[in-house]
Image (spheres, grey):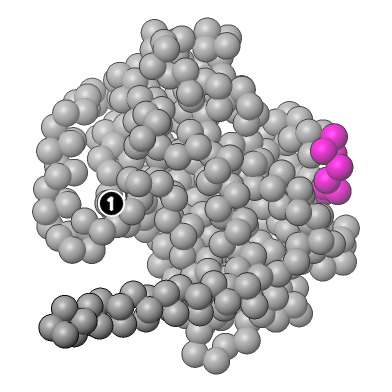
Amino acid sequence: MASRKRRSPVLFTAAALGAVALARTAVRALRRIDLRGRVVVITGGSRGLGLLLAEEFGRLGARVAIAARDAEALDRAAQRLRARGVEVHAEARDLGDRAAAEAFIDGVARAFGRIDVLVNNAGVIQVAPMRDLRVEELEEAMRSNHWSAVYTTLRALPHLDEQGRAARIVNVVSIGGRVAVPHLLGYNASKFAMMGFSESIQAELSHGGARGPRVTTVIPGPMRTGSIYNAEFGGSRQREFGWFGLASSIPIATIDARRAARRVVAAAREGRAEVKLGLSAHLLSWAHGVAPQTTARLMGWLNALLPPARGGAGTTRGRDLRAPLQSSVLLRLSNEAARRNNEAPPEAAR
């Protein structure tokens, strides 16, 4: 008798948890949109995660519009998408410029007649001690990572409003928007700004009876996209490339970019408020939420292990470096991802 009484709360809790899980699955299924014929706009869509997102949205029947600054990379991406049967509109634009961002959105609306989903993915990564970065490079990080998202979102909003709750805004932020990783000052600051922007528009558009587009904030940890060759490195450039390259290549600590793209598209279709990608994103978000000062101290200890500042200025893209590690087996996964994802690694890494 006593044993049955002890089991009752356990069974009740299990049943309650099961009911919650079923209810959540049912709600997601009701919110899920059919992408066939819808128009998806992806900034930074020429390579890496942006290109993989374009492929995944296209695979599910969406028409896709992509923009990027590198015209050659954009052309390769557009050809690749068309070869897969995706209807694509591509424009070479610097979306950190307000006029260019607004012209891109207007061009998509003219080309397709509507906009259903906006994915803000464009951005730059600068890896260097803060004393080796110029103000101009910090301004560029804000322009490319944060302001590009603001410009495209505000211009696209009237088109998205026409689709109501079936519209989506997806902001690809970063764990760097929750935890300030050393030697990523401009990236962190711009992603913190983007996090605030994303959560603010989510509050106004998606909650409290609002009938506007659903907003999804994406928080990736380190991802194997091959982006190390388009990141910018300052200070002790080869050493900065080395630690960042290794951190972007470790299998357990990083997430495969194609898998990440599938999860982002699934979250967008279901209108989820937030999705974290990778073990690092979950652990660091939890640690910062529970013990922010301890997390900050840990980042300080990490900084002590990284290359010291050299007092120089300026950055160099990873593809333009000739760091010995580029052809190392330690970067095999990143090099393979770079080749797959149109990141164009240097010849030494091929």
The residues colored magenta run 82-89
Give how far across and how far down residue 163 sits, in percent.
Answer: 74, 77
At x 76%, y 49%, the residue is 58
Look at the image and say whether residue 84 sits in the magenta stretch.
yes
Q: With respect to residue 65, does 327 lie above or below?
A: above
Looking at the rendered image, the quarter that the N terminus falls into is bottom left
Q: Counting other residues with Cα less than 10 Å from the Cα at mark 1, is it few (<14), some (14-19), or many (20 or more)? A: few
Q: With respect to residue 327, does 130 lie above or below?
A: below
Looking at the rendered image, the quarter that the C terminus falls into is top right
Q: Quadrant of residue 31?
A: bottom right
Outermost residue, front side? 1
Tell me, yes or no, if residue 284 can be seen here. Answer: yes
Tell me, yes or no, if residue 315 can be seen here. Answer: no
Q: Quadrant of residue 52?
A: top right
Answer with left or right where residue 40 lies relative to residue 203.
Answer: right
At x 55%, y 43%, the residue is 259
Give how far across and how far down residue 278 sits, in percent.
Answer: 40, 46
Callout 1, which amino acid? Leu
At x 14%, y 45%, the residue is 298
Answer with left or right where residue 27 lies relative to residue 34.
Answer: left
Q: Could you tell me which secondary element the residue under label 1 belongs to?
A: helix
Look at the image and say whether residue 328 sits in the magenta stretch.
no
Give how far across and how far down residue 115 sits, in percent.
Answer: 76, 66
The one nearer the camera, 1 or 301, is 1
Answer with left or right where residue 118 lies relative to residue 291.
Answer: right
Q: Which residue is mark 1?
A: 283
